[in-house]
Structures are given as C-alpha cells and as structure tokens.
Image: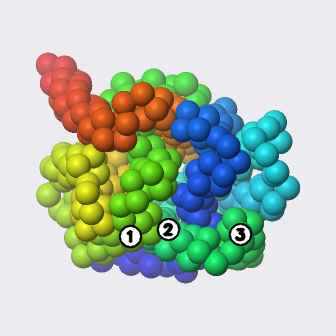
Amino acid sequence: MTTLLSRRFVLAWLLSFFSGLAFFLFVHFPRYLEGLGAGETEIGLIVGVSALAAIVIRPAVGREMDRRGRRPVILVGNVVSVVSLLLYLTVEDIGPWLYIVRIIHGLGGALLFTALFTYAADLVPQERRTQGLALFGVSGMLPIAVGGVLGDALLAHFAFESLFIASFGLGIVGLVIGLFLTESAPPVAESDRVPFMRSLLQPDLIPLWWVTLVFAFALSAYFTFLRTFIDETGIGSVGSFFAAYATTAITLRLVAGWLPDRIGAKRVLYPAMALFATGFLLLASAHSGIAIVIAGVFCGAGHGYGFPILFAIAFGRASSASRGAAAAIFTGLFDLGALTGAPILGTLVSRLGYPSMFRLSALWVGVGMLSFAWWDRDLRLRRRA
C-alpha cells in the first residue's frame, strides 16, 4: 500500500499546522472588536471583508497554481500572511486601516491555504484520497483546539496585542518550513489549461459547489459568534468547545479516516452533516459548560468528515489540468460562506438572539443537504438516460 507520510507531505503538514495556528488564534478576534466598540453586525462585516478579498483573488490563485505550480503560491501566501499579522499591532480603532489589514490577511490566507491543500491532494494516491486529505486536515484541526485554549490563556494574563505577537511568531515558523518544500505537480502546458469559468460551471461540480457553500455558511455561526455568545451567556468557554470540536474531528480522521474510501464518500457525508446540524441545535439549547462541550463534539464530527469528503469528490471530478482551479473554487467557497454568513447571521443575532440563529443554521444545513442529494442524484440519472 502506498505510504501517505512522504517527506513532502510531512513538511506541508507542519507548515499547515503552524500557519493554521496563527490563523485560528483569531477565533478570539470578535472579542477584540467588541472592545473597540463594534456590534454583532459590524463584527460580521469586519470578519467578512477578508473573505471578500480572498474571493476576488481566487481565480488568479487557481490560474497561477496550474501555470506555475503550487510551491510559488505557497511561498507568496506565507509572506503576505506574516506581514498582515504584524500589521494588526498598528490597529487602534474601527476604521479604514482595520479593513485594509483584514483585506491583506484575506489575500495571504487565500494564497497559502488553497495552495497547501492542493499540494497535499497532489501527493496522496487516488484510491486513498479522502483518507489522505483527512490526515492532512488534522494539521488544520489541531490549531482549532490549540488556538482556542492558547488564546484563552494569553488573554487571561496579557493584553490582546499578545495574541497578535503570538500569531506573527507562528507565521514566521511556517514561513521557514515553506522554504524546504519542493514542487508537487508540474505546471500545466498552455495548450492543456482549462479556463476558470469552465471549472466553475462543470455540471457535475455545481452541486458540490452548492453544498460546500451551505457548509461554509453554517461554519460562520460559531467561528464568528461563539466568542460573543460565550461572553453574553457566561456558559462554557471558547477553548472547551473548540478543544472538543477538534479532538473529535482528529480522532475520527486518525481512527476511521479510511471509511469514506472503503464504503463510499456520500454514505459517510450525509450522517456527518446530520451530526453537524445537531451540534447547532445543542448550542441553541445549551445551559451548561458540558452542553457546550457536547455541541463541540457533534459539530466536530460533522466537520471531521465533511471537509475532506467534499474536497476529495471535487478534486476527483476535476480534470488533472484544472485541479488548481477546482481547489481554488472549493476553498473560495469557504470565504464566500464567511463573507455572507458573518453579516447575515450577525443580523439574526441582533434581531432574534443566539438560540434562533443557531436553530436557523441547523435548518439551513438540513435543507442544503436534501437539495444536494436530489440535485446530484438527478444529474447521475440524466447521464445514464
């Protein structure tokens, strides 16, 4: 059996871990914005503006990955991300400069994480693609757990600037590791390149784009607003939720990451998304710290399988000449989900409260999965007819 843990895979995993930890310390960022006087809707807009920048640059990211390879994009993304983390130390109020820093941060993240996951997908064998991507994704799940707990510890003893300094230091570690990467896939010849819009509108990928957007939109409910939900209710902690969340996802990926490849990706996807939606319902009715932890377990189980399954299906349906573009679209949908989800869900919180927002997020996931199941099945049936 082909090994998954090649030298390049491990280096990319470490780069993803340190860069991801620098990124996920920002799960506490809404608390900083509250301290500057921002309300829930404005927090959603500030969080979402980095996603807008990432969306705008995605077509170029996909094109450059297919044209120049993955490594140059990873290195440029690393540098831009590190610069943006340092710039947060210059932010003093809610104003244009904060939005500019968020835009730079979004550009760096779009370059870096899109290219990293494409790099990893290039390295894993086709018959173990979901398992390989799930294993690589552990590098992104660990920072969710560690970022929440580390952020709690830093903010308990130091000013918020300590979080920005820690993020910058972690980003530098990732930047150094990135220098040792070698290319994972040769550039695509000019004559073989696939236009970005053709990948976007490929019929059997459109249902996947839809359900990925549904998933990404729902993630905004807790990645953006769990911090303020905890502060308002005094129930549990951000660190305990994300520790349970990430531990569950990591355990599933390490112990049963082979399951989707063995029994079928969608046979695992639908139960995973049901668990994901249940996690929102548990948050809506939470009255204790234990309930917050249990909600983290359910949400983490859904995310643990959902992301690698969807990415593996999309990567497999794309042609070898358009996988950079497909990866850019897939990861870009998470930015689109943040861009639309953060302000919309923030408005729901302002008008209806946190419990209603979480319940509507669960309903959104359910409706999205049902529509995907019908749409994708209908395409297959028409293809056979």
**2 or 1: tag closer to the N-terminus:** 2
Front residue of this view, candidates 152 and 207: 152
Which quadrant of the structure image shows residue 300?
Answer: bottom left
| Residue at (36, 25) in percent of width and height | 203
Q: CA distance from mark 2 to mark 3?
A: 16 Å
| Dot label at residue 25 | none
| Residue at (32, 30) in percent of width and height | 207
| Residue at (64, 41) in percent of width and height | 38
Disc 1 crowd, CA 10 A, few/some/many (<14, 14-19, 20+): some
- Residue 359 left/right relative to 212: left
**Residue 9: x percent and y percent?**
52, 73
Disc 2 crowd, CA 10 A, few/some/many (<14, 14-19, 20+): many
SS type, badge 3 = loop
SS type, badge 2 = helix
Is residue 275 placed above or below 134 in the rendered structure?
A: above
The residue at which mark 1 appears reads as 240
Tell me if label 2 and label 3 are in contact, CB under 8 Å: no
- Residue 305 left/right relative to 275: right
**1 or 3: tag closer to the N-terminus:** 3
- Residue 334 left/right relative to 73: left
Q: CA distance from mark 2 to mark 1?
A: 8 Å
**Residue 1: x percent and y percent?**
30, 77
Q: If the image is split into quadrants, where does the C terminus sit?
A: top left
**Residue 142: x percent and y percent?**
46, 72
| Dot label at residue 148 | 2
**2 or 3: tag closer to the N-terminus:** 2
Q: Amino acid at mark 2?
A: Gly
The residue at which mark 3 appears reads as 159
Q: Amino acid at mark 3?
A: Ala
Tell me if label 2 and label 1 are in contact, CB under 8 Å: yes
Is residue 259 placed above or below 99 in the rendered structure?
A: below
Tell me if label 1 and label 3 are in contact, CB under 8 Å: no
